[in-house]
Image (cartoon, grey):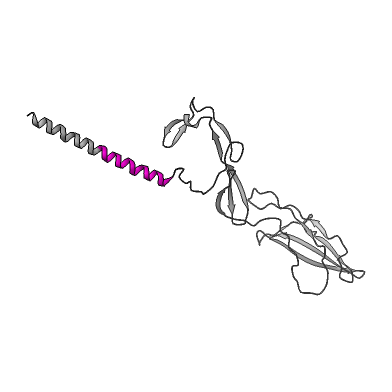
Amino acid sequence: NLTTYYAMNPPTAGQSNWTAYHYITDNPLTPVSVDPTPGTGTSLTFDSTGKLTSTATGALAPWTPPNSSAAPITATMDYTGSTQLSSVFSVNTLKQDGLASGTLTGIAVDNSGVISANFSNGSSTPLGQVALTLFTNPQGLTKLGGTNWGQSFASGAPISGTAGAGQFGEIQSGSLEQSNVSLSQELVNLISAQQAYQANSQSISTENKVIETIMNAFR
């Protein structure tokens, strides 16, 4: 939190003089001055009509949060448009160029294979990218077991790349791969195979009975 307070100085020639002091209150008990010269502040001068006549901007001294490896925080105070008039205090404009602290809400993978961490403050940070590999002859890969395959002389050398580039397709994150065959046709084929198996079984059973009958006739 940046705290600003104003101290009124003795007026001169119909002008009102103020000094604005700026402190960082990361720890309320030990505020740290972020004025370019600690304890000096920024001078503000208003004429008799309440119009600001002095320099309205000034850079604050860089401040690094304690026990943090973050880069120093820099800011510039802009008092343009300030007036010394009797009115109720209100914030007219607010410009934010940073993000609040956030927590990890999930992991996402885009079509190009980039893995990103999403945070509750709306930010997203890329963590890495999925690498893909092609082979000239995928059917020549050596089966290693456990759904793992290895390079062989027949498969050719591996070609590495990323999704969506060259011959590599895109990655569909969170998609369920459908069957690449017709389930109805495969079911029909299964029924046909079962009927053929049953017919063959009956043929073998009949053949066994005939042989048994012949053997009994010669006993």
Which secondary structure is most common in the magenta stretch?
helix
Q: Quadrant of the C terminus?
A: top left
Q: Residue at x 23, y 39 (%)?
A: 202
Judge left or right: residue 155 versus residue 91. Answer: left
Q: On screen, 180 above or below 36?
A: above
In front here: 195 or 36? Answer: 195
Segment tinted magenta in the rendering: 181-200
Report x, y in % for residue 10: 86, 68
- 191 drawn magenta: yes
Report x, y in % for residue 172: 54, 46
Report x, y in % for residue 79: 81, 62
Image quarter of residue 78:
bottom right
In front here: 49 or 185? Answer: 185
- 214 drawn magenta: no
Outermost residue toward the top in this view: 153
Q: Quadrant of the N terminus?
A: bottom right
* Number of marks: 0
Judge left or right: residue 175 versus residue 11. Answer: left
Judge left or right: residue 54 versus residue 185. Answer: right
Q: On screen, 134 above or below 192?
A: above
Q: Residue at x 30, y 39 (%)?
A: 196
